[in-house]
Image (spheres, rainbow, N blue to C red):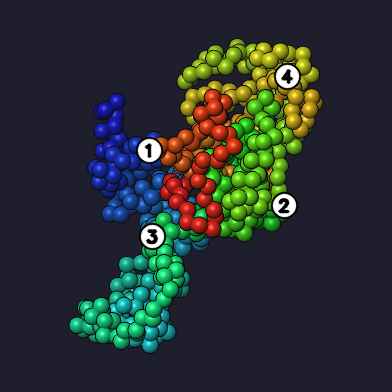
Amino acid sequence: MEGNVEKTVRALMSLGLSEQKAKETVKNPTVTKTLLTILTETRGVKLDDGMGMLLYQLGTKIKPQIHHHLPLLVKYIVSHKLDSTLRVDKAIEFALSHINNLKTDELERFCGVGVVVSLEDIKKAVAKQIDTHKQEIIEKRYTFNTGPLMQKVRADLPWADGKNVKNEIDTQVFALLGPKTEADMNPAAKTAKKAVKPIKAEPKEAIKKSSQLEADSSSPQGVTISDVMKKVNFHKPGENYKTDGYVVTENTHKLLEEHLKITGGKVRTRFPPEPNGILHIGHAKAININFGYAAAHDGICFLRYDDTNPEKEEEKFFTGIKDMVTFLGYTPYKITHSSDYFDQLYKWAVKLIEKGLAYVCHQTADEMKGFNPQPSPWRDRPISENLQLFEDMKNGKIDEGAATLRMKITLEEGKLDPVAYRVRFTPHHRTGNKWCIYPTYDFTHCLCDSIEHITHSLCTKEFQSRRSSYYWLCNALDIYCPVQWEYGRLNINYTVVSKRKIAKLIDEKIVNGKVFYFILVSKNTEYIIDSRLG
């Protein structure tokens, strides 16, 4: 195994990576596999200076849904047609929007293949911008920020070499201002000569408030959830297919077009708690992220109760959850329940059986546990038999624990065929005795997101292993598929951040269930958020 790793590291170093960078890259098996495929495509080709890094960029940025275009994009790089990071990025962008109908002539136009920007062109474009900002440059001298100038030149000449543009700006600024003076070298001393205005006495409260504002503005922690959410780099509504791991079908673009008509292109999120316990500070983070992201992008957020476990749900938890959302300063666009969609979920379960993608199983949960378990002996039973048994489950003819409906999919951690429905002879607080089968999280969550046309399904990292089943199920039913994004869980030392543990403390009379002993953070105050978003 060690020898294989060393061999892979050496192979990656042929792209121009340092040994350290190659070793770090090997830790990511998906990227490594893509880069090795790229190296196979370049076998027999001498990698020129810089070409290896462009291939590395391609390998780290390409999405799974356009892997079939990899040989073409590699060919364009080794033939010097995609000769800059900008052109490689543009090629990936074009391939993502033309997954099944990529035309090379259109690709080349989009990426500016063959477009040459001369030094004379750059000189003229820079001179134009220098002339426009001449007075400001003379006044500010070398404190003038040339960054915006460079952006404007690049906007006029999108295929110009960035280094050449920067060099030309520096050259022309120097020609205008001449060598740096002593004042340029010591701007602080120049500023110090300004007259200092006398400070008027202020009331103590005003001084205290002013100091706090100053501290907040200088501290990286003094930001609102809205500030944070505006900077998060998630996909735009309708651009689901551009995200990692998203499965694209023939119907994807049509479904996304219909989705945009329904939503008007607005961001839609949801906070989907299970009403079976008291919320804690971890939920405060989830509330702020879901409602905050929607608010920061002029969108809407649903409060959806995931009420699929009737034996654990109580009215006080429904009320408590709504109170917490309100306390944090948010108003749900709409309050919904997973149970609102039980009829539709059942129809989709039947459709899944009819497509041969779900089956009724009589194994226990313990028999299906562990990594890479043996397939269920009932996995390949006839569709007609599965349909009859599932109807029997719905009609109360099969005992609790005697059967489940399973989906035919293997999850990332090796879990095989997750349960979609189980039998529970417990009345539901909203549907009464209508149902004695209830859907699981794996089946319910993504389908409710689809029904409500959620654009960003935001959840903690623990659900990352469920992403494959999320996408698989929506695509298996050929319905709109949202995008799941994960963020880091909030953990705090010396306190309990678990509904299950809090419930145990309450049941054993160690704490009072009526006392909310955690700190909730309002969207209007400073909010410390885990930096591992996405």
Q: Distance between the Cα atoms at labels 2 and 3?
A: 41 Å
Q: Distance between the Cα atoms at labels 4 and 2?
A: 37 Å
In the figure, 478 relative to 395: above or below? below
Amino acid type of the residue that numbered disc 1 sits on in the rendered structure: Asn
For mark 2, give the secondary structure.
helix
Amino acid type of the residue that numbered disc 3 sits on in the rendered structure: Ser
Dot 2 surroundings within 10 Å: few (below 14), some, or many (20 or more)? few
For mark 1, give the secondary structure.
loop
Q: Distance between the Cα atoms at labels 3 and 4?
A: 55 Å
Q: To which residue does mark 4 refer?
A: 425
Q: Quadrant of the image for the N terminus?
A: top left
- The answer to whether residue 99 of the structure is visible from this angle is no
Circles 2 and 3: CB distance less than 8 Å?
Answer: no
Q: To which residue does mark 2 refer?
A: 262
Q: What x and y, as percent, mark residue 158?
A: 44, 68
Q: To which residue does mark 3 refer?
A: 219
Is tag 3's residue or tag 4's residue first in the polypeptide sequence? 3
